[in-house]
Amino acid sequence: MQSTTDLNLRSFVQYDEKSHFPIQNLPLGVFEEQGKKRVGVRIGDMVLDLALLERRGFFPSLPELFNTSTLNSFLAVGRPVWTEVRATVSRLLRDDEAELRDNIELRDKALIPVENITMHMPVAIGDYTDFYSSREHATNVGTMFRGKEDALMPNWLHLPVAYHGRSSSVVLSGTPIRRPKGQVQIGSQENPVFTASRYLDFELEMGFFIGPGSELGYPIPVNSASDHIFGMVLVNDWSARDIQKWEYQPLGPFNAKNFATSISPWVVPLDALEPFHCKGPEQSPRPLPYLQAGGDMAYDIKLEVYLQNSLISQSNFKFMYWNILQQLAHHTITGCNVNPGDMMASGTISAPEETGYGSLLELTWKGTKSLVLESGEQRKFLQDDDTVTFTGWCQGQGYRVGFGEVTGKIIPALE
Amino acid sequence: MQSTTDLNLRSFVQYDEKSHFPIQNLPLGVFEEQGKKRVGVRIGDMVLDLALLERRGFFPSLPELFNTSTLNSFLAVGRPVWTEVRATVSRLLRDDEAELRDNIELRDKALIPVENITMHMPVAIGDYTDFYSSREHATNVGTMFRGKEDALMPNWLHLPVAYHGRSSSVVLSGTPIRRPKGQVQIGSQENPVFTASRYLDFELEMGFFIGPGSELGYPIPVNSASDHIFGMVLVNDWSARDIQKWEYQPLGPFNAKNFATSISPWVVPLDALEPFHCKGPEQSPRPLPYLQAGGDMAYDIKLEVYLQNSLISQSNFKFMYWNILQQLAHHTITGCNVNPGDMMASGTISAPEETGYGSLLELTWKGTKSLVLESGEQRKFLQDDDTVTFTGWCQGQGYRVGFGEVTGKIIPALE
């Protein structure tokens, strides 16, 4: 059987070489058409309706997985089924396979133009965890708040620092983001004031979704962690820096981040990212054995940040110091259980160079300088009506395996 | 209509005056009998099967709420329905109402002895938030780790500090708690070691469950917060102090707490706690307007901690500096949405006196002294096979409105 990531694969569905969704990708998502939600696969500018294929008997050995409004059932069944579904979909979409290509009736029904659909949250997220795994980001933030000497906490190089996030407010790309209000301390005033956040920011992140869960009391070993991870999305972990600064000691950020986190709609399977594995940063000191993952476990995923259509940052997922297998192994080392649909995000992904920092906090160095946009406008933090968009893709030879985009527009605080 | 909390109410079900579950309480939970889960109300040592009553038409105006394995649907419908159900159940159980009392066939089926049932998690918890709202606890911990001068962070008296917890590992009372492993730093060694936690601890807390949810972008005002809160349980927020110490900077505790949190099975409605409202601690400085809740919004709930059957702490929920209405108002002030079944816990509830501290960390002052148990054994932190039990109740005139207990036994770490 030909690999589903083979660069020579072609689909009878047309797309150009910059499309994020060639036949080598095949991300899953939840779409709505004619009032009904179900699971589909993106190919070029079309969506393949998996619920229809399921009804027509294309997955005879599987339970019903696709006539539903979330990917959770699909996530729960695990890699053998993921592989089987991916192989079937890949085969059906190939230009040298007649079964779907030449069945006009089925093609017309099963392939739906993206302009005719609405996307929904792909997953009902149980728990959402946010890591802090970019050394560059942690160093930048640490330098700003604690000085260069104490920039990285002593624990940082030994474990993937993380905190639990708020899952109820994880929203789909395109959802407007209301500027939050809260307590902030201004200047050297002793008492805080209540105000709309004046330092609203984005954080460039990626996240992965848990497939089969684990049992309470039993860690997931780093070398089987990938069996529990289905795929990835782009994540914008919106942050109110002024609220964060006042509240975050000693238990971490809370209101500063609980108002919204945006994700991209198409979940790109780890299977599609296989060809883009690469070496991550050297880890020194050597991690404890439970964090030692063999092989090149980083991914070369180019990332871009646009503010009002101006490209303001170019980073890459490969800069992450801690990889996703280490993150999951660390998360569960205490016996913490995970469930299908849990989301784990990377933390802000900052490149070593200033042009690739993953937040305005870093790009404007705490607001001490301004970003100049293409329009000539300047920004230190986000203004009302600003739109922030992330995109990301792996560059293959003549094709891209991409994540589409995650975008959000700031709307004014409530009166 | 007679109030459902009237101290003169009597039930035809027998119980003594120390029972936690008189007719004035009527907590809800999820029980299993003959292989089937459904919702019930505890009365004395019996459970009233609400699913059966529903089938028999006792709640004619309501949708199906009780033939299910969680309270979530019931939580979502809100106070008017809660009040109606409570009134019906209260009436049916009264000793001066014949309808259930004299219907032997129905009584035999609808009232099941607790020894014939198994309890389950009452709620499918979406997000779990843990506050840090006891001034005594925060001061004790702050003093130990940062010294007396900096014990309370500058924000503490202005807002109810909180962090997001891990909901997947919230378990029912009675679930064994496996000692977690993780990274700890020993003495002045620079590098951490991997070990089973040597400083395993409990935290005496209570938690409340969200009823009707709120919309993203819209805060819940403090004065309508109670419409979103159904009831409360006892919570043990198990904590690995050595893991916590090494990991918690700068984003808060993670592995130190994600391995387990235990709750009691019966959810006591706020309606049953009405007679036990009392004044909370004086709040100075005066909170910002969004945190100003009128009235006496604390609750007088006596709390006890047992370690191996030795009473080691006596505290009270009324010591909480921030009340539950302020907690929910603060949580949502940014527009963070909440959903039916979300759980919010208080943080450790320490009394002003040493005999009422809510954790071993405080009771043994970081392990600098030992607790002596009734057996003569000594403890600094929890040993394998130790059992920790919390109980709590409101004392009325001749009756108690109680929470039963939350208990858990430590089992050894995995090899």
Image (cartoon, coloured by chain):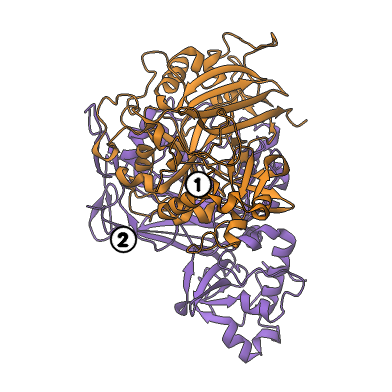
Chain colours: A orange, B purple
Q: Nearer the viewer, residue A60 or B286?
A: A60
Mark 1 in CB contact with mark 2 (< 8 angstroms): no
Q: Is residue B382 visible?
A: yes
Q: Which residue is more in the foreground, B98 or B210?
A: B210
Seen in the picture, residue A30 relative to B394 is either above or below; the reply is above
Give me the chain letter of mark 1.
A
Identified by mark 2, the residue type is Gln
Q: Disc 2 designates what residue?
A: B308
Residue A382 spot, x, y in % from top left: 65, 21
Image mark count:
2
Q: Which residue is mark 1?
A: A90
Question: Residue B414, relative to residue B117: is it above or below?
Answer: above
Tell whether A183 sits left or right of A251. Answer: right
User: Residue at 65% of width from left, 32% of height from top?
Assistant: B286
Disc 1 element: helix
User: What residue appears at the point 57 percent right and 69 percent down from the top-left corner?
Assistant: B399
Which secondary structure lies at badge 2? loop
Name the image quarter holding the C terminus of chain A: top right
Which circle, 1 or 2, is nearer the viewer? 1
Amino acid carrying mark 1 in the image: Ser
What's the CA distance linking mark 1 and mark 2? Answer: 60 Å
Q: Taking A40 as reference, is B355 left or right? A: left
